[in-house]
Image (cartoon, rainbow, N blue to C red):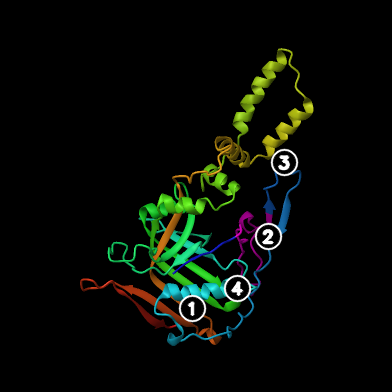
């Protein structure tokens, strides 16, 4: 069973910590100055001081009471069970993007973990968990969760190169449900990626070529300064430059934080594929499948005594045994 999901296409503030019961006056020290000076405004004539306030305690968390979960409620196949829960979330009016999830990867040998929000594009229950199983139905895609991204320069690409394992987390608050997935991340074929790439709007296809995802965008001010120098030389030779245009260009350079570089790359790609209807998928961009070996279903319950069921894949030991999913209830 394969289901295709059609989708349309900040950092939290830092919190200062203090002990509200401590009545001793703070010593006079720059490090304890009870104001934060805003230095982000360019050429600001005055600085803005923001007062620090003691953190407010979080209110008591709401109780979960919408539903319960028992082993008899669940499918033997976690991907089929996931599809059922996903369909419910997609049809819920209070969940606008039920297919969004957190993709977590880790780099080795440092072990540093990074996470980001991505769109799940399809999920397949498949017929065999083992991709090397020649007896599997070749007309059915392998089991897994499909996402698309840049696999050339992104952080996730770097992580995947050193560690092929990844995790997905889905959270549907109005249903009080969570699903966690762990497994191996593997690239889709160029043909599979192209098939999806063709369904994207043209701007997104151009953007995939133009963006070197996660690389730093440097301002074009240096190149503009060289152009200005050449223009001044021409001015000395008698060529007048429009002062208003010059001031506007200078303002654009002052305001450029690197976005201009990205815009120029987009223009270059547009020129490259001008008149081309079927833009080829970039070799560094495409789909990836998370082939799960663990899937956990979580249903919120009162008093934090939640229902948790974990599916773990167990490889077959005998010849011809493809393996099976083992389901267990976990303590909340």
Contact flag, marks 2 and 4 (Cβ < 8 Å):
no
Q: Which mark is residue 34?
A: 2
* Of residues 51 and 108, the one drawn nearer to the viewer in this rendering: 108
Estimate the spatial distance between the alpha carbons at disc 4 and disc 3, rounded to whole Å. Answer: 50 Å
* Of residues 140 and 252, the one drawn nearer to the viewer in this rendering: 140
* Of residues 38 and 96, the one drawn nearer to the viewer in this rendering: 96
Estimate the spatial distance between the alpha carbons at disc 1 and disc 3, rounded to whole Å. Answer: 51 Å
Estimate the spatial distance between the alpha carbons at disc 3 and disc 2, rounded to whole Å. Answer: 24 Å
Q: Which residues are magenta?
A: 8-36
Question: Callout 3 environment at 10 Å: few (<14), some (14 to 19), or many (20+)?
Answer: few
Estimate the spatial distance between the alpha carbons at disc 1 and disc 4, rounded to whole Å. Answer: 19 Å
Is residue 162 depicted above or below 283 in this figure?
Answer: below
User: Which residue in the structure is indicated by mark 3?
Assistant: 43
Please provide percent x and percent y for residue 83: 49, 72
Earlier-in-chain disc, 2 versus 4 = 2
User: Which residue in the structure is indicated by mark 1?
Assistant: 298
> From the viewer's perspective, is the residue at label 4 or at label 3 nearer?
4
Earlier-in-chain disc, 4 versus 3 = 3
């Amino acid at each position: 069973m394969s289901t295709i999901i059609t989708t349309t296409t900040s950092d939290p503030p830092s919190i200062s910590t203090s002990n509200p019961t401590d009545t001793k006056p703070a010593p006079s020290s720059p490090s304890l100055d009870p104001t934060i000076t805003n230095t982000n405004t360019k050429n600001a004539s005055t600085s803005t001081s923001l007062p620090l306030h003691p953190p407010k305690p979080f209110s008591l968390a709401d109780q979960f009471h919408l539903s319960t979960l028992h082993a008899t409620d669940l499918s033997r196949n976690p991907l089929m069970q996931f599809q059922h829960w996903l369909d419910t979330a997609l049809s819920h009016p209070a969940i606008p993007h039920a297919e969004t999830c957190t993709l977590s990867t880790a780099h080795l040998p440092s072990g540093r973990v990074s996470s980001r929000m991505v769109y799940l594009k399809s999920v397949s229950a498949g017929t065999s968990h083992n991709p090397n199983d020649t007896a599997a139905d070749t007309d059915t895609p392998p089991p897994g969760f499909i996402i698309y991204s840049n696999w050339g320069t992104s952080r996730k690409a770097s992580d995947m190169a050193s560690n092929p394992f990844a995790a997905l987390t889905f959270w549907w608050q109005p249903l009080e449900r969570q699903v966690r997935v762990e497994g191996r991340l593997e690239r889709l074929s160029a043909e599979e990626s192209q098939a999806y790439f063709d369904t994207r709007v043209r701007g997104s296809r151009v953007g995939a070529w133009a963006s070197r995802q996660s690389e730093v965008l440097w301002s074009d001010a240096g190149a503009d300064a060289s152009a200005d120098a050449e223009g001044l030389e021409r001015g000395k030779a008698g060529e007048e430059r429009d002062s208003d245009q010059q001031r506007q260009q200078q303002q654009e350079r002052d305001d450029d934080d690197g976005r201009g570089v990205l815009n120029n790359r987009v223009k270059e790609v547009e020129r490259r594929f001008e008149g081309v209807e079927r833009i080829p998928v970039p070799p560094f961009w495409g789909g990836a499948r998370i082939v799960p070996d663990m899937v956990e279903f979580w249903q919120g319950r009162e008093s934090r005594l939640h229902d948790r069921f974990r599916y773990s894949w167990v490889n077959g030991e005998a010849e011809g045994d493809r393996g099976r999913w083992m389901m267990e209830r976990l303590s909340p």
